[in-house]
Amino acid sequence: MTELDLSEFIPETLGVTQLCALLEDSHCTLQKLSLGDCRMTVEGFRALASALRSNPAHMRELKLGGSKAGDSGAKHLSSFLEDPNCKLEKLELSDCSIKEEGYASLASALRLNPNHLRELDLRGNYPGESGVKLLLDLKEDPQCELKNLR
């Protein structure tokens, strides 16, 4: 299996725990994961980022829109994006209550590991002027592969 869509389905605590156990398994080759509108909390983001860091090379597309991530969730996810083995190409974080601090974490992670993420969807968040500037500067960086920023 290379694609899993649990949008609007996964129960927060038990579901995320079981999903993370699957993602940590060295035999897991999941490339696309959709958890849109699952209302995942910061703790879910922490667990998910940890699981993805333990087996980072396969995941190419991650959809997490409509969660309760906030800045803390974005920071946890940024730890995965910083991993040199991370090959994620598309990340959707729309409507996740991410503000300037979360934007700064994401931009910092993508500066450390600029050669993979091509699409980033942050619609419906609250970047403030500094968050917008950080990501626009990043998009203009010739080392960064980010081509589609929403």
Image (cartoon, rainbow, N blue to C red):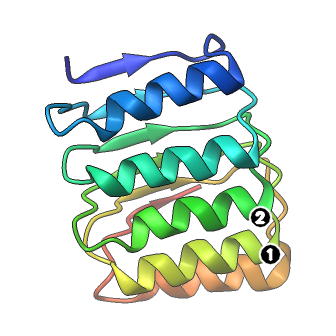
Neighbor class of circle 2 (other Cα within 10 Å; few <14, some 14-19, many 20+) is: many
- Looking at the rendered structure, the secondary structure element under dot 2 is helix
Q: Which residue is mark 1?
A: 100
> How far from the left and from the top, in percent, is residue 86?
28, 61
> How far from the left and from the top, in percent, is residue 119?
42, 54
Q: Amino acid at mark 2?
A: Asp
- Looking at the rendered structure, the secondary structure element under dot 1 is helix
Q: Which residue is mark 2?
A: 71
**Figure check: 130 above or below 22:** below
Cα distance between the residues tagged 2 and 1:
8 Å
Tags 2 and 1 touching, CB below 8 Å: yes
Give the left or right position of residue 59, taking residue 125 as reference.
left
Give the left or right position of residue 22, taking residue 99 as reference.
left
Between circles 2 and 1, the one closer to the viewer is 2
> How far from the left and from the top, in percent, is residue 11?
68, 16
Q: Amino acid at mark 1?
A: Glu
Q: Nearer the viewer, residue 53 or 105?
A: 53
Neighbor class of circle 1 (other Cα within 10 Å; few <14, some 14-19, many 20+) is: some
